[in-house]
Image: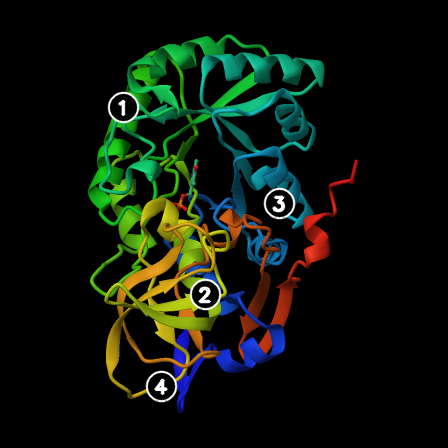
Amino acid sequence: MLNFKKKDLCIEQVKLSDIAKEYGTSTYVYSKNQFINNFESYKKALGVRGIICFACKANSNRTILKLLADIGAGADTTSGGEIYRCLNANFNPSKIVYAGVGKTFEEIEYALKNKIFMFNVESLEELDAINKIAGRVKTKAKIAFRINPYVDPDTHSYIATGKKGTKFGIPYEDAVKAYLIAKKKKNVIVLGIHSHIGSQILDIKPFKVAAQKIKKIIDDLEKNGIGLEYINCGGGLGIKYSKDQKAPSPDQLMSELFSVFDKDKKFIFEPGRSIIANAGYLLVKVIYRKFSGGKNFLITDAGMNDLMRPTLYEAYHEVMPIKKINTKKVKTDVVGPICESGDFIGKDRMLPVLAQGEYVLVTCVGAYGAAMSSEYNSRPLLAEVLVDGNKTTLIRKRAKWEDLLSNEEQK
Ligand SMILES: *Cc1c(COP(=O)(O)O)cnc(C)c1O
């Protein structure tokens, strides 16, 4: 939803220079209509065949969660804290699913007491824990097993989760055995099967290969008298971070996957990145400029604590000035203020020569941006602003230096 009003770059109808003036920098800015549209295109593609559960680890701001819950989203959660946030944001518990290799007993009890829809169970020991706790709190736990289908998508190794040798899910060859064990548990209802093979996947092929392997398990289970109602295809659909990338649509993904399974099945999808990434921006200010070692540097007020993806995954995010400038472009490293060489936003970018105090915008940071930020270097967490048409709303206050000390007593 980026566009120019004369020389000013805008998100929806709001000039970024006005946002900088009103809220300061650095600031996360979200286009409400962009993520609503992204969600609607998933919803439309799925129709009445199941639930779209927003993977809220991508962005768990309570206003963003509330807006998604309001338009019928379910939630894919990975911790008790995320379930707490989602209940607070008014998600229907019957649309909350819960994955994760290390669910604690406290988290399991909390999820059961709040009647979430389904646990995506990742080990037999976890199954035992869920069965026991469900017995204790006198309820039945609905479960799917998360299966590791041994598929290697073409993505960064840190976000490939469905390969042999990762910690995730039940090993492919043990899947049927796991269901036979689960069937005998008194306090467990076997409802589905789950796989999530990784993130930022731009090719539909690995999704389809995983689906075919899951179909094979479903067939084997049917031979053993176990029918499953829900197929959870996980998340992971990639987005276009740079101009030379192409991302499939939810519709393309689903029509490929639906062709693998029988018509009566219900589906769950757990998109995170593809809902919120391209709706989020980081607005930063140029503090200093320097020329060193044959390179131009723009030193900004956002560091790797605010946006970790470049440092952690060597991720690419486009960087652009917020005014149309026609001066010549020079090769520039855009970096943060933190004492680490890994603290950069973008390297070797062709950018116009900017003055001190001017602003640049980092794009597609709505997923795993604010959500992964920390106070490293004792830098308070950033403000977050929502844009809706010509209106802006502060959806997270900028933290203050005092906040850094708020949980520490001086002993
Ligand atoms: C992270 C995660 C997702 C979301 O992945 P995206 O790439 O953000 O769509 C979905 N399901 C599970 C189990 C996850 O861990």
Q: Position of residue 375 (x, y in %)?
A: 58, 49
In the image, what residue occupies the spot 66% across and 62% down? 397
Along the line of sight, which residue is nearer the eye, 179 or 316? Answer: 316
On screen, residue 115 versus residue 312, left or right, reads right
**2 or 4: mark nearer the eye:** 4
**1 or 4: mark nearer the eye:** 4
To which residue does mark 4 refer?
A: 324
Which amino acid, by three-letter code, is at mark 1? Lys
Q: Secondary structure at mark 3?
A: helix
Q: Give the class, few, some or many, for how many residues have Cα within 10 Å of label 4's Cα (few <14, many ≥20).
A: some
Outermost residue to the front: 293
Which amino acid, by three-letter code, is at mark 2? Tyr
Q: Position of residue 371 (x, y in %)?
A: 52, 49
To which residue does mark 2 refer?
A: 281
**1 or 3: mark nearer the eye:** 1
In the image, what residue occupies the spot 30% across and 21% down? 217
Q: Which mark is residue 86?
A: 3
Alpha-carbon distance for marks 1 and 4? 48 Å
Alpha-carbon distance for marks 1 and 3? 32 Å
Q: Position of residue 141 (x, y in %)?
A: 59, 22
